[in-house]
Amino acid sequence: MDRTPEPAGPSTSATRPRRPLGLPVWAIIGLALLSVPRIFAHDLGIDAGPIPAILTVGPVVVWIVAVLWARVPSPLVTLLAVGAVYGVALGIVHNVLWDQVFGDDPPTLGDIDADLSEVPLRIATAVSSVFTGLIVGLLSGLVATLVRNISGKAA
């Protein structure tokens, strides 16, 4: 009976699946989707009282707490991924609610007919939405990294 010696220490691949983003994909998507109610509220004009502020700040606070609690290797990378998914959701919701938001007065590109302007404007909306999501992810990732470093809980 030939025995091969066991490697010293536990194997990380055997004890935990490798997650380059620090969280499972379902968690990244779930965190991003926490921001979707704010998108609907904004696009549908529900901007009165404290609810919009809570819907804006609350999800980002949850993002930061989640990556700190999970002790992800890089809060910045993880929250950039969350922000990217949020940006995609932002673009989708803006485009789905386009007619609801603009009604009979859609935006145009200068003197170009509104029907010809719609496609490039929708594309620009999608691109700027992803960019917005990435910026929110970047800023929240920087805050999470700063909090982690200050609190001494660096992994």
Image: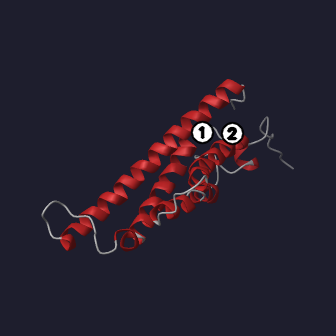
Question: What colouring does the structure picture have?
Answer: secondary structure
- Name the kind of residue labelled 1 in the image: Pro
69 or 47, nearer to the observer: 47
In the shown orientation, is residue 1 left or right of residue 53? Answer: right
Query: How many numbered marks, from 0 up?
Result: 2
Q: What's the residue at 36%, 53% (across, down)?
A: 128
Find residue 123 and report its image quarter.
bottom left
For this orientation, the residue located farthest to the front is: 49
The x, y position of residue 68, in whole percent, is: 69, 39
For this orientation, the residue located farthest to the left is: 111
Relative height, residue 16 to residue 122 (above, below): above
Regarding mark 1 in the picture, which secondary structure is present there? Answer: helix
The x, y position of residue 148, in whole percent, is: 66, 31
- Residue denoted by label 2: 68
Sort mark 1 into few (<14), some (14-19) or many (20+) by Cα contacts within 10 Å.
many
In the shown orientation, is residue 116 left or right of residue 14? Answer: left
- Name the kind of residue labelled 2 in the image: Leu
- Residue denoted by label 1: 75
Q: Is residue 142 visible?
A: yes
Regarding mark 2 in the picture, which secondary structure is present there? Answer: helix
Quadrant, the C terminus: top right
Find residue 36 and report its image quarter.
bottom right
In the shown orientation, is residue 27 left or right of residue 100? Answer: right
Q: What's the residue at 41%, 61% (across, down)?
A: 91
Relative height, residue 139 to residue 95 (above, below): above
- The span from disc 2 to disc 1 (Cα, nearest Å) is 7 Å
For this orientation, the residue located farthest to the right is: 1
Disc 2 to disc 1: CB gap under 8 Å: yes
